[in-house]
Image (cartoon, helix red, strand yellow):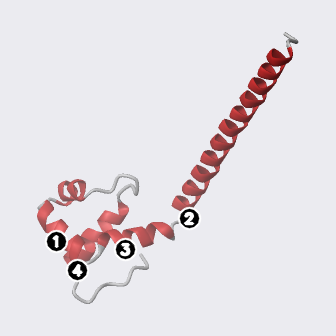
């Protein structure tokens, strides 16, 4: 997986972490993992805290090309939506400006 094995992480904890990484990255859950592995949630929480699972999973995700592509596409989509809204607001502001100007000059 590319993650360094912390010196104190047991093979069982490491196997649980690897199962955690295999979960869908958008819906990772210690509760779901506990059900999957037949382990107690509190045990997985202790392992997770002791061995920095959240940080290690985030690092794993940052290096995953599929996840990078997802966020890049999401970023492009958000920017395009923002630009479209901004253009619509500018167009409406121009319309209002000219309506008011014509009304002021009595050109209606």
**Residue 20 location (% of width, % of height):** 31, 64
Q: Which residue is mark 4?
A: 11
Depth check, mark 4 against mark 3: the one in front is: 3
Whether residues under marks 4 and 3 lie with C-beta atoms below 8 angstroms apart, the answer is no
Q: Which mark is residue 85?
A: none
Q: CA distance from mark 1 to mark 4?
A: 15 Å
Q: Nearer the viewer, residue 36 or 42?
A: 42
Whichever of labels 2 and 4 marks the residue nearer the N terminus, that label is 4
Query: Given contact means CB atoms under 8 Å apart, are the residues at marks 2 and 3 in contact?
Result: no
Task: Work out how far the residue at label 3 is from the one at label 1, CA to CA, in angstroms.
Answer: 15 Å
Which image quarter is the C terminus in? Answer: top right
Upstream in sequence: badge 1 or badge 4: 4
Callout 4: helix, strand or loop? helix
Name the residue beneath numbered marker 1. 46
N-term mark: 2 or 1: 1
Among numbered discs 3 and 1, the one appearing first in the sequence: 1
Residue 95, percent from left and from top: 77, 24
Q: Choose between 108 and 4: the one closer to the eye.
A: 108
Question: What is the CA distance from the residue labelled 2 to the residue labelled 1?
Answer: 30 Å
| Cα–Cα span, label 2 and label 3 | 16 Å
Please name the residue that numbered disc 3 is placed on: 56
Residue at mark 2: 65
Where, quadrant-wise, is the N terminus in this rendering? bottom left
Q: Nearer the viewer, mark 2 or mark 1?
A: 1
């Amino acid at each position: 997986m590319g993650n360094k094995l912390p010196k104190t992480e047991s093979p069982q904890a490491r196997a649980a972490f690897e199962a955690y990484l295999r979960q869908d990255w958008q819906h990772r859950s210690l509760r779901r993992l506990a059900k999957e592995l037949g382990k107690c949630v509190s045990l997985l929480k202790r392992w997770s805290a002791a061995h920095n699972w959240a940080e290690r999973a985030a690092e794993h995700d940052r290096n995953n090309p599929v996840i990078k592509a997802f966020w890049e596409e999401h970023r492009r989509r958000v920017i395009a939506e923002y630009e479209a809204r901004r253009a619509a607001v500018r167009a409406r502001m121009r319309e209002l400006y000219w309506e008011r100007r014509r009304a002021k000059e009595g050109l209606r």
